[in-house]
Image (cartoon, rainbow, N blue to C red):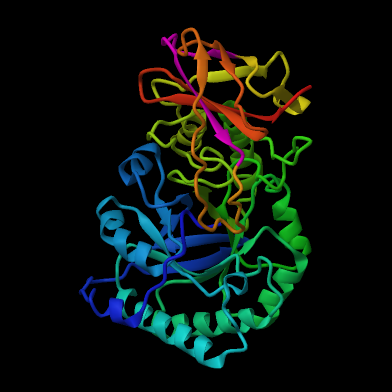
Amino acid sequence: MIPIHKVSLTLASLLLVTFSFGQAIKVELIQNEGKWQILRGGEPYYITGVGGQTEMDRAKAYGANSVRTWGAHEAIAVLDEAHEKGMSVLFGLWVGCERQGFNYDDSRAVEAQLARFTEVVREYKNHPAILMWGIGNETDLFYSDFKVWDAINDIAEMVHREDPNHPTMTVTAGLDVAEVQLIKDRAPAIDVYGINTYGAIIGIDNQLRAYGWDKPYVITEWGPDGHWEVEKAPWGAPIEQTSTEKAASYALRYDQGIRRDPWMCIGSYVFLWGQKQETTPTWYGLFLEDGKETGVMDELELAWSGKYPENRSPQIHQYVLNGKTRFDGVYVETGKLTTAKVDAKDLDGDQLTYRWEILPESTDIKVGGDKESRPEAVDMKMEGDPNKSEIQFRAPKNEGPYRLFLYIYDGHGNAATANFPFYCVGEL
């Protein structure tokens, strides 16, 4: 996935940003008694990274030490700030994707892409914030032309010639034996395997070894259950985890999917350090649209720093619509009085407030994290006080699929969230 949208760097725009950065910090990959490790400036370095470039002060405060970028523009924009905060940057080079129209049979386009990246590497290779070069993200998603791996290898070889101080990485969507073999055979200049993985993260270490990879790897995206991995309502709407369920998933996946392999895994980047619309406005972002944090962040802070924050986020224990759960395939009549109820608790005893919102099910669904538009909220006709854990509202007047979103706040910058897919019909 990508955080919001793909950004590219033209040579013309590059010429507008010419600076002198001083001395690069050398990054090496070493293997000692079978264990891979990063040395940065001669010191051991394990990546506790964030995928996204917002709220870097919070990332640093919570224990993160690296920032992942997907394209050159966004990398250039955060290099100085990251260095000032003592953080490194996985410098993304957005390699053209077949699903977005890039044609690897067009030799001129391939050569132009390599030329652009060569200029970028020459210009920025000495910036002390750079950790690695991330050459391509999910170029294997819905593709058929294996020449993309030849192009990635050409870029990696160029990086090694131009910049001996930083390793190369490429990133695939999940893990597949074919991609591992293709990278080994056609892109041997890649030093590190990057894997974007969600519900399938536990056991991926054994898979990677079974598929023949013997170099280090990084989990370059990880987080909640992906929208393609979950149960669906009868009308096809994927059922999103509550923030409390997500927090438990993050804790388990960091412990059993990342930290349990100190031999080949050299770190990770959690996704998404920010907020975006992807299937829903709450699915992947570690922040809500208003900047509040959920219990997921509590678990990340524990994983990175060894301690929970002083004030914890609210927790959702049950969320029902007309007495039914999200997994019951709930249909309601248009315009009919409907009851929603949540059982939520706060570990600190803070007084909770509630906000409810109805959105139509999104129809602007893309792949690979490409930009999607947020549905417009439906006018919600409430009965009584909306700031309650149990409310009544009139179902939308138009037939079709919707989601009832719930946001719970503790007054200390923390929140819990959930959404409930339901379908409006003219008559039951």
Quadrant in which residue 344 is drawn: top right
- The quadrant of the rendering that contains the C terminus is top right
Camera-nearest residue between 305 and 320:
320
The vertical placement of 109 against 266, above or below, is below
Rendered location of residue 73, percent (x, y):
35, 67
Residue most extreme to the bottom: 108
Camera-nearest residue between 149 and 228:
228
Q: Residue at x 70, y 60 (%)?
A: 175
Q: Is residue 190 left or right of residue 59?
A: right
Camera-nearest residue between 186 and 55:
55
Q: Residue at x 54, y 58 (%)?
A: 370
Q: Is residue 258 left or right of residue 24?
A: right
Give the magenta part as a residue range. 341-361
User: Is residue 41 at least partly visible in the picture?
Assistant: no
Rendered location of residue 153, percent (x, y):
57, 82
| Count of labels in the image | 0
Q: Is residue 237 left or right of residue 268?
A: right
Q: Residue at x 58, y 51 (%)?
A: 364
Residue 203 belongs to the span the image colors magenta: no
Rendered location of residue 188, percent (x, y):
62, 80
Q: Residue at x 38, y 52 (%)?
A: 53
Which secondary structure is most common in the magenta stretch? strand
User: Is residue 266 at least partly visible in the picture?
Assistant: yes
Q: Is residue 316 left or right of residue 233?
A: left
Quadrant in which residue 9 is drawn: bottom left
The vertical placement of 281 against 158, above or below, is above
Rendered location of residue 150, percent (x, y):
61, 84
The vertical placement of 409 against 283, above or below, is above
- The quadrant of the rendering that contains the N terminus is bottom right
The vertical placement of 159 against 193, above or below, is below
Quadrant in which residue 76 is drawn: bottom left
